[in-house]
Image: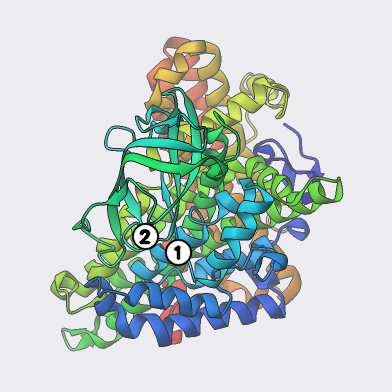
Amino acid sequence: MSTTTEKKSSLKGGEWLIKESSPFDVFIPEDFNEEQQMVKDMCTSFLDTEILPVIERIDKLEPGLMPSLMVKAGELGLLGTSVPENLGGLGKDFITSTIVNEALGGGFSFSVALSAHTGIGTLPILYFGTPEQKQKYIPKLASGEWKGSYGLTEPNSGSDALGAKTTAVLSGDGKHYILNGQKCWITNGGFADVYTVFAKIDGEKFTAFIVERGFEGFTQGQEEHKMGIKGSSTVQLYFQDCKVPVENLLGEAGKGHVIAFNILNIGRLKLCAAALGGAKRAATTSIQYAKTREQFKTAIANFGAIKNKIAEMAIKIWVAETALYRTAKWIDDKEIELSASGKPFNEAFLGGAEEYAIECAILKVFGSEALDFVVDEGVQIHGGNGYSDEYIISKAYRDSRINRIYEGTNEINRLLTVDMVLKRAMKGRLDLMGPAMAVSKELMSIPDFGSGDDGPFAAEKKAIINFKKAILMTAGAAVQKLMMKLDSEQEILMHIADMSIETFNAESALLRAMKLIDQRGEASCQFELDIVRSYIYDAADHINKFGKDAINAFADGDEQRMMLLGLKRFTKVNAFNNKEAKRRIAAKLIADNKYPI
């Protein structure tokens, strides 16, 4: 496989799998500029002063409370971070809008409402609307005067969005589309003023429409009683001969899927950001509890078992943060590149998000599962108290669970990760054939059992290269063996996706640590080094297990034995005292009394 170092500007979506990156080309959170840090601090302050003190009132769906908080956020510009200034927004870059989602991610139901409003509630009109539609709706959405929502899911079409049954028929006078159907699980549905609703024109052409509260024939159901995010308004929408003006058709007739899928790419990355913000606060809650809760005459934070949990939380959070901002900068760079080539605002941004749709899917899966891990272990650290509503960790636990379902279930996103890579390879967008063939030849060679420790991070870099070889070997053989049947072998595809997730995260983490050490020196980066080495050490075992399960599902005989030997070679890492590294990670967080937000 290629060992050429590529600059970030030339790295395409998915290309990290076949090319190495330089740490000097990767963007990391420590690179935030002064303005971005100020925005983050403002969001943190807003959460602490305006949201968390009234969180119980929010959970009780106090009438008018959530809309009023949205207006306050709008007054600070937090609803229009990425909206152009000529439409009433701040016109900030994608990194800054990602920072806002992360910093407000610890706001429980408020975070859900804000993310839905700024994402799926606003972006379809911003990126696909006509100039007239943008002028009418975007300034009011950016200020919070109007609240946004999105109607895609139906009772019988969840992951299969194109299976929607809601219909639209042009009226006899040609002035309206008449919508009939039902939408469910609509976030912000109970108080929104503007909805992007998907329906099939004449039962065939999947199309988006802008629907306003008050349109004739449009009603909503009662608030859903949910397991978590109780303060987030969730209702069903009903359309009974609903009259939508023809000028409210969004985008092109029959091209609703373009809107839905492009907006989901962005939403997946932003969900990871929000999950990251929630995970940081949940970790802090657990660290502080562990320091004050005593058993056997000592704080439970002094116990190795608790230290291990705190360290595992920190590792997942730090790695998720690293992969998130690496990808966000890629999207930002691609948007700038496309804009410079003459692409209009909407096409430039959507082109950037589409280019890195693979990475957005990876982030959605890892971010949501990292948060689930953190809150689950947080409840465990709290013991019986963690099961009590008197402790906020129980709310964090309940609220977290939805993240693995919406914005495409994690199963769908795992399948998409591999599907998109293979489709890009078939279209020539991603050159996988050469590297995959090189790995196949390497399987026939005499293995090199040398340590490879001939320079700084040589062992870690070699591990990442070998992880990629394991993916190419497994995926290449699966494609060759199963051909067109691979689509139906979802278990194999998900194993390959999990290998990819671990590898992308491991490489991102290593690059961040290398860049920090270059800036600050190794002596001041022990915390980061422990995280990276622990993650790579554990990832090797995970990748080995995912690879074995995939290989054993489609190979047998000599082919199976050869591939398993190759997998063992590609997931071999040096011995490492993981326990001591994790104790050092935990010790720093316990001394700091928090996970740094």
Q: Position of residue 496 (x, y in %)?
A: 48, 32
Q: How many marks?
A: 2
- Pinpoint residue 132: horizontal percent, then vertical percent: 65, 53
**Residue 516 occupies quadrant:** bottom right
Up/down of 559 relative to 461, above or below: above
Question: Which residue is pictured at 27% across the width and 74% down the height?
Answer: 63
Mark 1: give few (<14), some (14-19) or many (20+) Cα within 10 Å.
many
Q: Which mark is residue 147?
A: 1
Between disc 1 and disc 2, the foreground one is 1
Q: Nearer the viewer, residue 519 or 280?
A: 280
| Residue for point 60% across, 66% down | 139
Three-letter code, disc 2: Asn
Secondary element at tag 1:
loop
How far across and down, in percent of the image, does residue 583 sit? 41, 72
User: The residue tagged with tag 2: helix, strand or loop?
Assistant: loop
Front residue of this view, candidates 117 and 296: 117
Q: Residues within 10 Å of mark 2 (few under 14, many from 20)?
A: many
Q: Is residue 222 above or below residue 504?
A: below
Which residue reaches farthest right? 341
Check whether the beta carbons of the residues at disc 1 and disc 2 lie within 8 A of each other. yes
Q: Is residue 121 visible?
A: yes
The location of residue 501, given as percent across then percent down, is: 51, 44
Name the residue beneath numbered marker 2.
188
* Residue sitting nearer the eye, 61 or 246: 246
What's the distance in space between the residues labelled 1 and 2, CA to CA?
A: 8 Å
In this rendering, the answer to whether 112 lies above or below 237 is: below
Task: Give the amino acid at mark 1.
Answer: Lys
Sequence-first disc among 1 and 2: 1
- Point 75% across, 43% down: residue: 11
Q: Nearer the viewer, residue 392 or 201?
A: 201
